[in-house]
Image: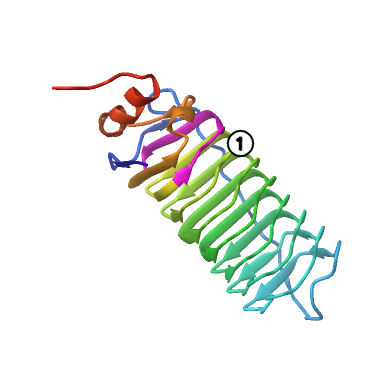
Amino acid sequence: MVRSSGSGGGTGRAGRAAKGGVAEARRPEVRLPVLVAYEGGGLEPDGDYDGVRFDAVDLADESGPGARFMDCALDGCALDRTELVRARFIDSVLTGVRGVGTDLAGVALRDVEIVDARLGGVQMHGAVLERVLIRGGKIDYLNLRKARLKDVVFEGCVLSEPDFGDAQLTRVEFRDCVLKRADFSAARMESVDLRTVAELDIARGVERLAGAVISPSQLMELAPAFAAQIGVRVEV
């Protein structure tokens, strides 16, 4: 396990390039239309939800594999054991959602904001995330194995034991967030910015950080792990 504390502070931006020449993630720009209230009745497999507001709806144990959510808002909804395998969320905002064991395997998120979520044991292996902002909240045991993340920002959130094993991360920013016991085994990275991570705790896969950018202080703390990977012994 490798742990490092972040350098703190933001970085200046100029167009699509952040300070140091790191490509900047494109954030979602969600502008929701006037929404209609969800009328209940339960989620449906391959259901089509367009311009719907789910306000404090209990969706625990509901099943809607393959469902499509476009221009939707989920606010304060319970997602315990909710099954949304291969669902699609487009131009949508999820605020204050909570739950344990939510199954989002193979989900597609495009232009989506997830704010102040409280989730545990979320299955998102094989998911595709593009222009996604995850801000605030806490997510435990997030499974993103073999997922593809492009233009994704994790901001001010706590990720406890996230699994990025064999995932592809392109233009991904971790800003002022906490990563506890992260697994990057076999991950592939391009323009991944870790410089302002408040706590960087890597359980596995430190050797997969090629393509990531870290701060000088993080480099010093990660140096023993890097040396071990290439077989260098450090002795006094």
Q: Is residue 176 magenta?
A: no
Q: Is residue 231 above or below residue 135?
A: above
Residue located at (41% from left, 48% from top): 179
Q: Is residue 52 above or below residue 173?
A: below
Q: Main secondary structure of the magenta part?
A: strand
Picture quarter with the C terminus? top left
Q: Amino acid under label 1? A: Asp
Picture quarter with the N terminus? top left
Q: Is residue 9 left or right of residue 119?
A: left
Q: Is residue 45 left or right of residue 57?
A: right
Near mark 1 (Cα within 10 A), the count class, few <14, some 14-19 or many ≥20, is many
Q: Quadrant of residue 48?
A: bottom right
Residue located at (47% from left, 52% from top): 161
Q: Is residue 58 visible?
A: yes
Residue located at (51% from left, 38% from top): 184
Q: Is residue 40 above or below residue 6?
A: below
Residue located at (62% from left, 66% from top): 101
Boundaries of the magenta span: 182-197
In the rendered image, residue 195, in percent from the top left (x then y), is placed at 36, 36
The answer to which of 52 and 208 lies nearer the viewer is 208
Residue at the left extreme of this rendering = 236
Q: Is residue 39 left or right of residue 179?
A: right
In the rendered image, residue 222, in percent from the top left (x then y), is placed at 31, 32
Q: Is residue 193 magenta?
A: yes
- Which residue in the protein does label 1 denote? 166
